[in-house]
Amino acid sequence: MSAIPDIRTLMEQGTCLADPLPGHLRFSNLPRMAIISIRAGLRAYFSTYRIAGVSQVLSQGPSQPLKHDEIIRQESSPDYLEVYTETVLHLHYAIELALKELLRQKHTLLASSNLPHSAILLCRLLHKESISFKDEETLKSAEFAEALKRVITLANAKLLDGDLSIVINHKTLLEVLNTLRNKIIHRGLFVMDYSAFDLVISAHIIPFLAEFLYLPQFEIQANLAVSSETTPLWKYKKLACGIDPLKEIANIGKNTEHAWEKLALLKELGRAAYQNPLDAPESSLAPFGVGDSNARCRAEQLAKHELSNLNPYAYHGANEILKCPVCGLHSLVRYNDGDGNDTEVICTCCTFNVNRALGNAGNYGLPIDGFWSP
Ligand SMILES: [Zn+2]
């Protein structure tokens, strides 16, 4: 084996995502990276029920307050901290990139925190002439708070393109999101309660993103799908039950009955939809039958095996195989406890997994067959 290159040489081995177009034609990669970051943030948020939500949903009611040891166990567990942090960082990063793109479209310098040292570069930028990728790299980009302030000031003065009232109207939300992100990044000493965090993301951030993502400035990237899929790049695959978890989450009102259970189920539907290994029926790969036949066979056989194995964990077994609302296979295994009571369902294909404490989805108006026998 030849000698390992020095660290600087290694760090330069990569591809500029906006190459090989010349400077004046080079597109901005900010919207695409923002979209990918939203995907990562949503995946992390949807995972919070599976990681920490089971006992939290049990404890949401006033008659069942959280015990101290439960708080220690849930919000301080490494798995919860990981998805909580990932959710905040990725969504914050996505919004920061998008704000900078709004500024960049007006002028490159508006998305930069200071003027370049090179007078030649400054002159070229002021005249909107093409600059090299290397020159562009020397510009220090504006941070979230600065970018937000500039977008709002310029939008109020009607100096940016289009209607940006969505940003102006959510100024406080974006400021507190930035504060939360800074608390995590700079000190790492603060973690929000599970239920409060749920409300921040589901009742504030998701409805904001649903509108913000579809501003004309981002619409093309937001609608772009990878060739084998039928949903946009940032989104999960379509669910077999026809529900769109994000749409339903954005519509959960404060006073909705069973709101916590409904939100928990929707998060788990979304998480499993991101994990679903099957091709969508309308996928461009489906006619060729190349993609998922192995995954289908494996999942269905595994589910049948679970049903015939009465004591998989020594204390409970599977008692039925149901149709999974996410991937649509008959691979949703229902387990029961030692007394024969249903406890949880787990899909051997897409990993969908909920606890009986959520009750049947029909109780809160979702068109999914009940999982639990009376
Ligand atoms: Zn499934």
Image: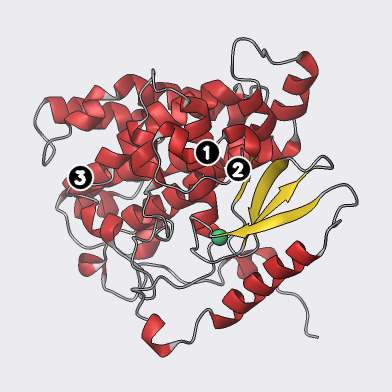
Q: Residue at the far right: name it.
A: 314
Mark toward the start of the polypeptide (3 vs 1): 3
- The residue nearer to you, when weighing 277 against 142, is 277
Residue ID for mark 2: 372
SS class, disc 1: loop
x and y, in percent, of residue 232 in the image: 34, 60
- The residue nearer to you, when weighing 161 against 219, is 219
- On the picture, is 111 further left or further right than 350? left
x and y, in percent, of residue 337 in the image: 79, 42
Q: Quadrant of the C terminus?
A: top right
What residue appears at the point 23 percent right and 23 percent down from the top-left corner? 169
What residue appears at the point 34 percent right and 59 percent down from the top-left corner? 29
x and y, in percent, of residue 80 in the image: 67, 36
Q: Are marks 2 and 1 in contact (CB under 8 Å)?
A: yes
- The residue nearer to you, when weighing 169 against 201, is 201
Q: CA distance from mark 3 to mark 1?
A: 37 Å
SS class, disc 3: loop
Indicate the quadrant where residue 249 lies. Answer: top left
Q: CA distance from mark 2 to mark 1?
A: 7 Å
Mark toward the start of the polypeptide (2 vs 1): 1
Q: Amino acid at mark 1?
A: Asn
Q: Are marks 3 and 2 in contact (CB under 8 Å)?
A: no
Residue ID for mark 3: 215
SS class, disc 2: loop
Task: Work out whether residue 83 can be spotted.
Answer: no
Task: Work out whether residue 36 can be spotted.
Answer: yes
